[in-house]
Image (cartoon, rainbow, N blue to C red):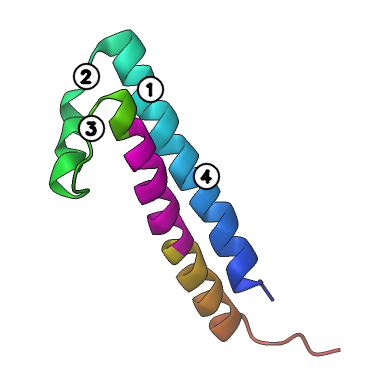
Amino acid sequence: MLNKNAFGLACGLVGGLALFLLTVYLVLIHHGGETVIKLNQIYWGYSITFVGSFLGLIYGFVDGYVAGWFIALFYNAFAGKKVK
């Protein structure tokens, strides 16, 4: 049985940090990216800037938390209990 809040928190941290690091990488190394620029259509205010990286951190955390919470919910519902 998965703890929904713990799994959501773990997924949120991974999602937020991934989007944050990707944005910082694009700002410092590639100066933008065609695919990631499309994220500003999904996330209001997001851009390939240092400020956008912090917005990406927040958006990624929220999305990851919600997704992780629902994954744990469905896992717990469908996994069932072990029979001894």
Q: Regarding mark 4 in the picture, which secondary structure is present there?
A: helix
Separation of marks 2 and 1 at Cα, in angstroms = 10 Å
Instruction: Give the magenta part as a residue range.
Output: 53-65
Q: Earlier in the sequence, mark 2 or mark 1?
A: 1
Separation of marks 4 and 3 at Cα, in angstroms = 17 Å
Task: Mark 4: give few (<14), some (14-19) or many (20+) Cα within 10 Å.
Answer: some
Give residue 10's quadrant in the image.
bottom right
The residue wearing badge 1 is 24
The residue wearing badge 3 is 36
* Amino acid type, label 4: Val
Task: Mark 2: give few (<14), some (14-19) or many (20+) Cα within 10 Å.
Answer: some
- Do tag 3 and tag 2 residues touch (Cβ < 8 Å)? yes
Magenta stretch, main secondary structure, is helix
Give residue 37's quadrant in the image.
top left
Separation of marks 4 and 2 at Cα, in angstroms = 22 Å
Q: Residue furthest top?
A: 29
* Amino acid type, label 3: Val
The residue wearing badge 4 is 14
Q: Regarding mark 1 in the picture, which secondary structure is present there?
A: helix
Residue visible at 52% across and 44% down?
14
